[in-house]
Amino acid sequence: MTTNHSPAPASGPLHIGVDVGGTKIAAGVVDDDGAILTSTTRPSPAGDAPQTLGAVVDAVRELRATHDVLAVGVAAAGFVDAERAVVMFAPNLAWRDEPLRDEIEQRTGLPAVVENDANAVAWAEARFGAGRGESHLVALTVGTGIGGGVVVDGRVQRGRFGAAAEVGHVVMVPGGRPCPCGLQGCLEQYASGNALLRRAQEVATTSPVLAGDLLARAGGRTDHMEGWMVTEAARAGDVAALQVFDEVGVWLGRGIAQLAAVLDPGLVVLGGGVSAAGDLLLDRVRDAYGKNLTGRGHRPLLRIEMAAFGPEAGMIGAADLARDVAGRGGGTTSG
């Protein structure tokens, strides 16, 4: 467990945001300007639902001990129902029909709201980040998988049943790579952080001479490779690593072109771990988007930008979305 403190003075009421991922739980006290005053992290016992809940509650209690907070928002990597109360399914967590909101409220005494993690990221970017002033925004979190969030005219679009914008599970290759969601050929099997690493390992195995720098960073072993090594090798000119970024960029650009055909947003924001590659990824995505856009040359092009917030975006968005449950009717409405 690690805890970080910021000396910045608070602005307005305080809320807690918790971002629950497959490997880490991050929680923070966030003010009305989206600033994190204090944060804490701990490992995520992803394979054990009760332990994951316990870790979330423990983080909330730790932060609440030093700050007067009004409510808690939880960003969960999974399908959340329309009432923002139950995690119906989480591919990389053990939660199945988990009544998370009620359990957190009972164990912390704070009003709570549960949100899909990509929705929380989209809200953070729309409110405080790269999407400020944009009326139609899509955020894509490109990490272990690919999550999506949509904000239109100041409201998160959750869909009729709460499971909207699951962009990572749009089937791009019928009968393609198996996905934990139960389908085959989903976008995240070709354009996520996991996909990038898997392809790098495959290319390095079949063409070790081309992947010389990449293999050197991994001690000569493909099973020791990590995503950041692929990024660094690509920046250093490693042919195999660059080839992998070419492939991932094409798939992600194609996916964004499909989104444009359905949603016609003005801005797509890329967040998540893979976004750390910056222009190495962004240039390829923009190029592929332009080549695959329906009606290209006869319609405006959307903007594709990197997220303003890094791994803290989900925490910030979840905390801000908790404003509408603070006091159960006494707070403001958001999202």
Image (cartoon, grey):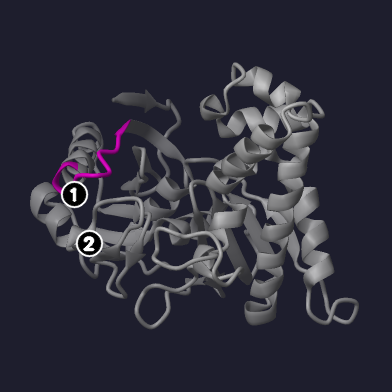
Identity, as a three-letter code, of the amino acid under mark 1 = Ala
Q: Residues within 10 Å of mark 2 (few under 14, many from 20)?
A: some
Q: Where does the image place residue 143, in percent across and percent down from the top left? A: 52, 46
Image spot of residue 305 (x, y percent): 71, 53
Residue 176: in sight, yes or no? Answer: yes
Q: Are marks 1 and 2 in contact (CB under 8 Å)?
A: yes
Tell me: 222 left or right of 55.
right
Residue at the disc numbered 2: 96
- Residue 166 sits inside the magenta stretch: no
In this rendered view, identify the residue nearer to me: 227 or 8. 227
Q: Name the residue under label 1.
A: 49
Residue appearing at x 36%, y 33% in the figure: 39
Q: How crowded is mark 1: few (under 14 residues within 10 Å), some or many (20 or more)?
A: some
The residues colored magenta run 42-51
Identify whether 35 is placed above or below 329: above
Query: The N terminus is located in which quarter?
Result: top left
Query: Quarter-wise, where is residue 100 in the image?
Result: bottom left
Place of residue 136 in the rendered image (x, y in percent of width and height, measured from the top left): 63, 72
Helix, strand or loop at label 1? It is: helix
Identity, as a three-letter code, of the amino acid under mark 2? Arg
| Left or right: 15 in relation to 312 | left
Instruction: Name the quadrant containing residue 332.
Output: bottom left
Quarter of the image with the C terminus in it: bottom left
Q: Is residue 292 left or right of residue 134?
A: right
